Amino acid sequence: MSYNENNIFAKILKGEIPCKKIYEDQFILSFHDINPQKKIHALVIPKGKYTDLDDFCKNASINEMVGMFKGIEIVAKKLGVSIESGSGYRALTNIGNDGGQEVPHLHFHIFGGEKVGKMVS
Ligand code: 5GP
């Protein structure tokens, strides 16, 4: 699937749509999910144009990959859910139709602030 420049997260990255920002650096942007499924529900997205994790693993640079995963760790710490700052969380990314992905720009969900529950329903 080719990258759709008009997806909602592309618009957030371009500043065309507002978000409740948690953290930003040269590689990632993180913000609160508009429809939280847990007490804490944040999203971490790369600044590069990648549709999903599959595309990212194939095409992103090593620096972008490190930036993505460091970003998750930084955001979890900031939210107080990391092992260092809290009591844990779930990082999850949906990929494609069977994965249940709705927005075609790679994003990791960070769920926490309470027991997250069963892994798959
Ligand atoms: P997916 O199903 O693609 O893994 O997750 C997409 C997520 O994006 C959903 O949890 C949904 O609530 C969130 N979302 C969709 N549109 C917006 C938006 O405009 N702003 C924010 N902050 N989150 C959004």
Image (spheres, rainbow, N blue to C red):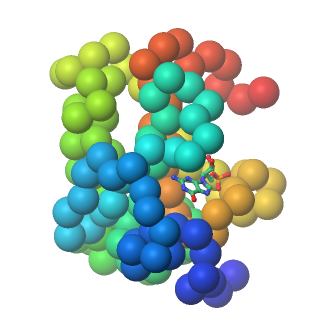
34 relative to 9, above or below: above
Is residue 84 rendered to the left or right of residue 1?
left
Q: Above or below — where is 120 with respect to 6?
A: above
Rendered residue at 43%/56% (across/down): 19
- The answer to whether residue 50 is visible is no
Position of the C terminus by quadrant: top right
Residue 23 vertical position relative to residue 36 in the rendered view, above or below: below
Task: Say if 57 sits above or below 59 in the image.
Answer: above
List x then y, in percent, for residue 36: 57, 35
Q: Position of residue 95 (x, y in %)?
A: 65, 58
Where's residue 74, x and y in %?
22, 42
Which residue occupies the foreground of this view, 35 or 75? 35
Q: Residue at x 61, y 75 (%)?
A: 7
Residue toward you, 4 or 56: 4
Numbered marks: total = 0
Residue at figure coordinates x 23%, y 35% from the top left? 78
Q: Residue at x 49, y 35 (%)?
A: 41
